[in-house]
Amino acid sequence: MTRQPTTDAPSDPSATDEAELARRLGTLTLEQKVRLLTGADFWSLHPEPAVGLRRLVVSDGPAGVRGELWDERSPSANVPSPTALAATWDEPLVERLGGLLAHEARAKGVDVLLAPTVNLHRTPYGGRHFECFSEDPLLTARIGVAYVQGVQGGGVAATVKHFVGNDSETQRMTLDAWIGERALRELYLAPFERIVGEGQVWAVMAAYNGVNGHPMTESPLLRQVLHDDWDFDGLVMSDWFAARTTEPSARAALDLVMPGPIGPWGDALVAAVRKGKVDEALVDDKVLRLLRLAARVGALTDIPTTATPLHHDAASVAARLRETAAAGFVLARNEDAQLPLDRVALSRVAVLGPNAAAARTLGGGSATVFPPYTVSPLDGIRAALGDDVEVTHGVGVTPQTRVPTAALAYLRHPDGSGEGVEVSFLSEDGTLLGSERRTGGAYTWMGSYGPGVPTGEVARVEVRTVIRATDAGRYAVGGSGIGRFRMSVAGVEVFDVRLQLPPGADLVEGLMTPPQRLHTVDLAAGEETEVVLTHDTVTHDTVTHDTVTHDVDSSDDALGDAVTMFQLNLQPPHGSDDEEIERAVELAREADVAVVVVGTTEEVESEGFDRDSLVLPGRQDELVRRVAEANPRTVVVVNSGAPVLLPWSEEVAAVLLAWFPGQEFGNALADVLLGVAEPGGRLPTGWPVSEEGLPATEPVDGVLAYDEGLFIGYRGDGRTGWQPPRYAFGHGLGYTTWDYVSIDAPGELPSGADLTVAVRVRNSGTRHGKQVVQVYAGRPGSVVERPLRWLAGFAVVEAAPGEEVVVTVTVAARAFEHWDTEVGCWAVELGTFTLEAGPSSATLPLAVDIAVGNS
């Protein structure tokens, strides 16, 4: 369904509208008000006809707008991951992408987008690293502001999350992050502050974790920081199932408990107000904020909003995603200018690696969407080169230990009507309650099995399909999920098993990478066999075959009860790693150039768990080295959302970091490899050379101490134990070269004033190009503990060959300030600061001193 706001341009409710909101609030009973403060279901809020409030719909997520369905029936444009967006350093580009997301949201009837995620890249082990922008608070803030302004410019609310300290996943529901006051203010709160102030974001999400002794859904930081310090007038919602108390969370500045209809408020909150334990004025403030949000998105009758979502057709969406993906690709190495490739000189190209034909375009968890299509690197390169160039392919290695979700190409409807599966919902006695025809192997229902299906009566979900072998060999087929699963193949039951999480696992980990049970079957080419996978949605006491059981953390019970999520899995025949590596080496040896696409898997990079290693999974490092030995013109494309170790980086011709680049991956990659587009990205986080000295994600006795304080990422330069990275923050090459000519800035600056810095650069190469001019501040001889340097400003510039341009970089007054813990406010250490300019945090050829004083 498409829902449009009532009028045409974005603004907040006027003073008159505010008075009207207050009037409407005054007509509600306490029970009506409290009912509004807990969600109606997983993705919506209660309507209230008494005040003209329609149903409000919220949606994940950071890589596209999923809507209310979590499956392929509701396809969504899969945009590049947030880390890829930050790698562009291009605010106008990100703002335009936000407008596209608003268009997508309105087409799905969505009012509130649960993005952006602006937690910092404190450590590359963080499981949702790909879902966050950067290790630097300024870059995170500026990209976040652009994202929010694009989304809200289309009349859709953005939700900045997760406030605050949700920078890793291990024990995220219960951990207490101990963060020093300066680090909290100068690093972790800083992106939220700018997005609330400059971005005027309409909603904030409170995190699962605690900070300094208080769970965030009942933390004093919500009121002290958001309300008192920043004058935030929007709504604060809980992360899903994060609110667990009635009175403490109600007395905090938490406004909305999600999801619903169950939760700790409801009747319990009404009773707490009646007993005088919670002031009704607090409830009124929460409801007023909810009504204000509703007015902003056009959900209140007779209060017109001012928003015009831009409209996009399929071609313009594809073009925007293709452009954005290429703009985020980081060319980390380009020995002897091997890239771009000369198409005319190519006769044979080998496209190799596990991610070449089945690339990852997005990360797991709440960022998951179901794109209408994906262009793999292999398909994109073949399409770009055409029939004149032979493109060969080899998988090289299989790094996954899990069997993937069954691909549609192998599935046939039991009635022979085409590709797909039949899903049936059955009662305890086997009565058919409803059915669906599906074209995917992953199934998720949240709170409802769909229209016409009596959810409370569903005891089993049955998936029936016919598997058709494309090649002769041994096929692994099975199911993944939590609970009881039975499978029959060709009418014979092959397993009956109960699968549960390992001890201490986050339930989301189990939902994203669920335990599996498999059965192998030998099939001839073209042979078909019927498969039936049955999942019990209620507990059964008898399991006839194997049982795998462990206790599930009780804090996850509500989510587990509300979600039915499982997969039909299928692995077609493939060679051993030894065989596939040898084949890849032969293909590389016979090719003019070898493009090797390596990357992470859903098993190591997803919401719900942190990584325990930065090594590429499986034997991918061996594959790269063997291919590079066979062909010196080896280009490695790294398809990961977060840093991985690249021990072979000096042995290959070029290294291109592609992140999770969205559904246009292959086309954007072909554009960059062939020079149709320049790789526009610069690193939003440094890529380490080893795992030594990196911050941990494992709490000790429930506490995760941020012992590194202010010194995360490149800010640790000069500290004991700091390891220079393989590729520094801000690093990235293009297809031309640049000279940094001069820097000019005022010699003195009154404290509290912004600063304009002029940096002169010259395109000294032979192609038109883009450069990100970065300015870093430092305070030599400081008596205040601080990093050697920190990002103070940046600007993107383009120039023709030989052209010299002056780039204006604004450095905000905040860049010279630190948080004074004694008085609890921002302060300036008077004296001389140094500003350095260059193409990365490790290459800063220009410098100028600035005297910052009181005048």
Image (tube, helix red, strand yellow):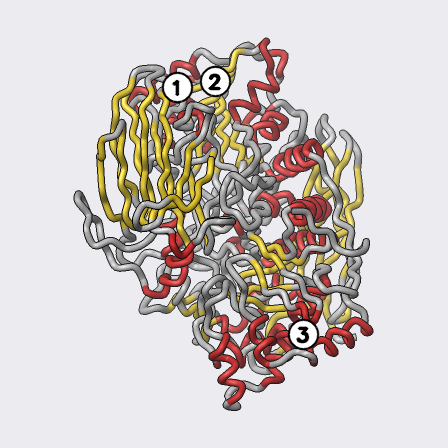
Q: Quadrant of residue 169?
A: bottom left
Q: Amino acid at mark 1?
A: Ala
Q: Secondary structure at mark 3?
A: helix
The residue where tag 1 is placed is 584
Question: How far apart are the two marked residues, 2 and 3, measured between alpha carbons?
Answer: 60 Å
Q: Which mark is residue 288?
A: 3
Q: Amino acid at mark 2?
A: Ala
Label 1, residues with CA under 10 Å away: few <14, some 14-19, many ≥20? many
Looking at the picture, how far across and down is residue 718, in whole percent? 49, 57
Q: Contact (CB < 8 A) between labels 2 and 3?
A: no
Label 3, residues with CA under 10 Å away: few <14, some 14-19, many ≥20? many
The residue lying toward the viewer, choosing from 457 and 413, is 457
The residue where tag 2 is placed is 350
Q: Contact (CB < 8 A) between labels 1 and 2?
A: yes
Q: Nearer the viewer, mark 2 or mark 3?
A: 3
Quarter of the image where the C terminus is located: bottom right
Horizontal side of 770 relative to 702 (left or right) equals: right
Picture residue at 27% right of the left edge, 23% below the top: 474
Question: How far apart are the two marked residues, 1 and 2, measured between alpha carbons?
Answer: 8 Å
Q: Nearer the viewer, mark 3 or mark 1?
A: 3
Q: Amino acid at mark 3?
A: Leu
Looking at the picture, how far across and down is residue 176, in whole percent? 41, 69
Looking at the picture, how far across and down is residue 772, in whole percent? 68, 44
Of callouts 1 and 2, which one flags the residue occurring earlier in the amino acid sequence? 2
Q: Which mark is residue 822?
A: none
Question: How far apart are the two marked residues, 3 and 1, measured between alpha carbons?
Answer: 62 Å
Looking at the picture, how far across and down is residue 537, in whole percent? 34, 51
